[in-house]
Image (tube, grey):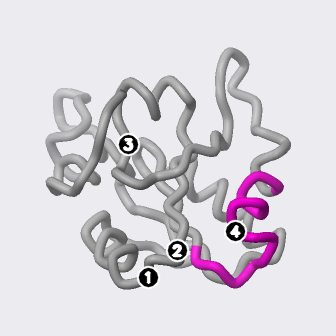
Amino acid sequence: MKHFTPKEAHSFLQSNPEALLIDVRSEIEYLFVGHPTGAIHVSWNDGPDWEVNPHFVGEVKKLAGHGTERPVVLICRSGSRSVSAGEALAEAGFKNVFNVLYGFEGELDEKHHRGTVNGWRHDGLPWEQC
């Protein structure tokens, strides 16, 4: 698995329109916190028990057209869950898996707030909210 900063990921997605951008956060995060424009939601884990989605790999395979060559860019809140999700895809044979460092909201600052240090939103990249 390779890693991109948010700006590198955005540039890669612009240059590779066949690539999938998968947001692996919970449905609530995706809908109400916001998500990158064009991202497809497939939870890695979700409430109430935060168990790993046993259908994650299968859902991504379906989106990728059942192949393992299509580039898949994964994003979560801070870049942690997307690493675990990417490892699962790599184990399933996906060859072009990318993780977005710092995720959508970024790392915590000294006041334990997100969005002030780095991340997709912090970098001013396109996003939307429901």
Q: Would you say 111 lies left or right of 9 here?
A: left
Q: CA distance from mark 4 to mark 1?
A: 14 Å
Residue 127's x, y, as percent? Answer: 28, 47
Three-letter code, disc 2:
Ala
So how many labels did they put on this image? Answer: 4
Nearer the observer, disc 4 or disc 3? 4
Q: Would you place residue 7 above or below residue 18 in this image?
A: above
Which disc number belongs to residue 16?
1
The residue that mark 4 highlights is 64
Q: Which residues are magenta?
A: 58-71
The quadrant where residue 114 appears: top left
Residue 74 percent across, percent down from the top left: 53, 59
**Sequence-earlier tag: 4 or 2:** 2
At x 64%, y 79%, the residue is 70
Residue 47 is situated, as x and y percent measured from the top left of the image, at 65, 20
The answer to whether residue 96 is seen in the rendering is yes
Q: Which residue is mark 2?
A: 19
Work out how far the residue at label 4 is from the one at label 2, CA to CA, in angstroms: 9 Å
* Cα separation between marks 3 and 2: 17 Å
Residue 88 seen anywhere in this rendered image of the structure = no
> Pointers 4 and 3 in contact (CB under 8 A)?
no
Report the disc number at residue 73.
none
Question: Residue at position x 50%, y 65% from top?
Answer: 99
Near mark 1 (Cα within 10 A), the count class, few <14, some 14-19 or many ≥20, is: few
What kind of element bears circle 3? Answer: strand
What x and y, as percent, mark residue 121? 23, 47
Q: CA distance from mark 1 to mark 2?
A: 6 Å
